[in-house]
Amino acid sequence: MEEKKKYARTLVTTALPYANGPVHIGHLAGVYVPADIYVRYLRLKGEDVIMIGGSDEHGVPITIKAQKEGVTPQDIVDRYHKIIKDSMEGLGISFDIYGRTTSETHRKTASEFFKTLYDKGEFIEKTSMQFYDEEADQWLADRYITGTCPHCGNEGAYGDQCEVCGTSLNATDLINPKSAITGNVPVLKETKHWYMPLDKWEPRLRQWILEEHKEWKTNVYGQCKSWLDAGLQPRAVTRDLDWGIPVPIEGAEGKVLYVWFDAPIGYISNTIDLLPEDWEKYWKDPDSRIIHFIGKDNIVFHCLIFPAMLMAEGSYQIPDNVPANEFLNLEDDKISTSRNWAVWLHEYLEDFPGKQDVLRYVLTANAPETKDNNFTWKDFQDRNNNELVAILGNFVNRAIVLTNKYFDGVIPEAHELTDYDRATIEEFKGVKDELGKALDTFHFRAALAEAMKLARIGNKYLADTEPWKLAKTDMARVETIMNIALQITANLAIAFEPFLPFSAEKLRKMINLESADWNKLGSIDILSAGDRVEKPVLLFEKIDDETIKVQTDRLERIKQENILKNFTPKAVAPTVSFDDFQKLDIRVGKVLTCEKVKKADKLLKFTIDDGMKGRTIVSGIAKFYNPEDLVGKEVCFIANFAPRTLKGIESQGMILSAEDADGRLVVIGPHGEVRPGVQVG
C-alpha cells in the first residue's frame, strides 16, 4: 500500500452558513464540531494548520428574509453574522478567522476569479427563458415563484422545490405560477447567462475522485460516483439579481455571480484577510493540503463544482479530503429552520451556561458520520449524567480528592510497580495510537470513545486497587496507586483537549499542567512527584429532569404551533337534506364505566347512562385517552345506529369525536351539565 504523503501544512475550511438565521445543532454536528476537533488535534501535535470560516451573505434566502422584515439585505447579514460568530466563539469553535462574503476583499477576489476564467474562455454563454414580474420590473429567482406542485398538488410549492413532497422542481414545472413579490402571474422572457461546462472537467474529476481518492468516506465517495455516472451538465455561474457581486464584464449589467460560485471563493478571500502576505502557500503550494468540512447537501459543490473551478483557474491545489457528514434529526423529526424545529446554538448557550462541552460531547457521540442520526434531550441528559459525570468527572474528582486527603495535594512518588500496575499502564498507552488513527481518518465518534476508554481504565484501576482501604496499612502502596491515577488524569487532559476544550483547561489548572502536549499522551511521567494539585473542582454536574422538561415542553409548543399553522380543514362533504339529518338520533350520555378492550390497542368499552336502560358502546379512541379520565364525563353519541360486534362486544351506538389538526381525537360533549338522554339537534 502506497504511503500517504506528508504535508507541510493544512488548510481546513468549514461550510459557510447562510447569514439569514442562527446556527443550530444540525450545523454543529455536521460541520463545525468535527472540524474544530480535527484542527485542535493537529495543533496539539504541533502541526501548521489554519481554520477558515465565515458567513455566506449573498443569495436569495437573504433577500427573501429582508423583504419579509421590510429591511435591507445588508441589515439581515449584519445581524446574523454577529449572532453566528459570537455563538461559535461561545462554543469554542476555534477559527483562525471567521469572515464574510460582503467584505471588500471577497468582492475583489471573486470578481478576479470570474474574470480569470472568463478571459481563459472557460465559460459558455447560453440564453434561456426565465420568469419576470412586470409590475415589480424584476427577474424572479426560483424562490420568488410559487405555484401548485405537479407531483403532489401542494399549492405553496416553490420554483426550486416542493417542501411537502420534497421533489426538486424547475420554476417552469409549477402549475399556475405566481410572483411571490406582487402575486401576479409572471411572464417568460429571454435572458443570457454564463455557464461553467462541468462536463469538460468530468474525466479529470472522475480520475481524481474515483481512482485517486478511494479512501474518502463511503457516503461522500458514493454521492460523487452517482453524480459522475449520471453525467455532469453545464451550470449557470450568473443570475439576474440585485444582491450579490456584480458580474465584472460588459453586457452583464443587472447580473450577479451565482451564490454557489461566489461562496466557496470566500474560503480564499478569508485566507487573504488572515494572511495577506502568505495566503498563497496554503492554497497553491503542493506541500499544502486542503480539507473541506461540510454537510451532505454541499458534497456536490465541494467535490465536483469548486474543484472544477480550481482546475479551470489552474494555479490552485484541489482538496485532499472532504469528510462530509449526513444530517442530524431532532427528536425523530428533520430539523427545519422554517418550522423553528431546531436547537439554536445561541439559545443553548443562554439556557445551559458553562455547559458548552456537554453539547460538544453529545453531538460528537451522535455524529451523523455516514448516515443520518438523531438528537434527543433524554439522550443528552443520559450522556451527561451517565458518562461525563459518572465516568470522566467521577474519576478525576476521586483522583484529586484522594491526593488532597492523603498527601495534602502533593503528588506522591511511585514505588515498585505490581503486575496489575504494569498491565494498566500498558493498556492506557495504547489509547494514543487508536485515538490518533481515528482522528486521522475523521472517525470522531470512535476517537471520542477511545478518549473515554482512558477514563474507564482509570475508574477500574481505583476501584480494583482501593487505596482508601490500603491507607490504613500500606501508604507506600497508596503513593504508587495515586501517582498512576494522577498520570492517567494528566493523560485525560491531553486526550480530551480536542473534544472538550473548556473541561480540559479546567483539568489542566487542577493538576497544574501548563499545556497539553500530544507527544506525551500515553506517558506515565507527565506529572512530577513533589508538584502540587489544586483543590478539586467538579468538571460536570448532573442535569435534572426539570431542566430537560423545559426543553421538551418548548419543542412540543413549537410542534403544536406548526400543526395549527399548517392545518387546512377538510373539504365540506356533499350537501344532505334536513330530513336526512333528522334521521340521526344524537343524544347526551354520562360515562359510568370505561375500560380497555383486551387484545385491541385502539378500543375502549363504555357503559353509558342514556337516561333509559343504559347501553354499551365500543369506541376507537384508546390511543388518546386513559379510561379512568373519561368516567363521569358527559358525551354525545348516536343512539340509533344498528348494533355491531367488535372483539366479541356488542356496541350499541357511536360516541362523537372531532379530529384535531395533529390527528388527535377529542370526545364531543355539552359545555354545561345536561340530563342523560337529552337529544341534540
Image (cartoon, helix red, strand yellow):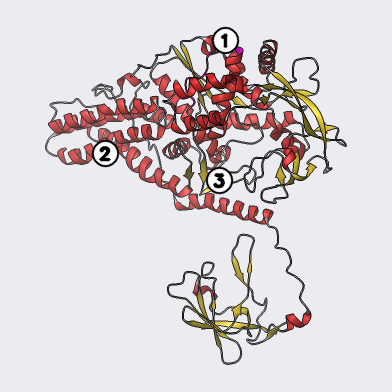
Label 2 and label 1: CA atoms lie apart by 54 Å
**Residue with the mark numbered 1:** 315
Q: Position of residue 28 (x, y in %)?
A: 52, 34
Q: Which mark is residue 657?
A: none
Q: Amino acid at mark 1?
A: Ser
Residue 99 in which image quadrant: top right
The residue to which callout 3 is attached is 334
Question: Helix, strand or loop at disc 2?
Answer: helix
Q: Tell me if residue 410 can be seen.
A: no
Q: Nearer the viewer, mark 3 or mark 1?
A: 1
Which residue is pictured at 30% across the width and 37% down the height? 395
Instruction: Residue 459: give its label.
Output: 2
Contact, CB < 8 Å: mark 3 with mark 1?
Answer: no
Q: Earlier in the sequence, mark 3 or mark 1?
A: 1
Find out whether residue 316 is within the magenta segment: yes
Q: Is residue 677 above or below residue 262?
A: below
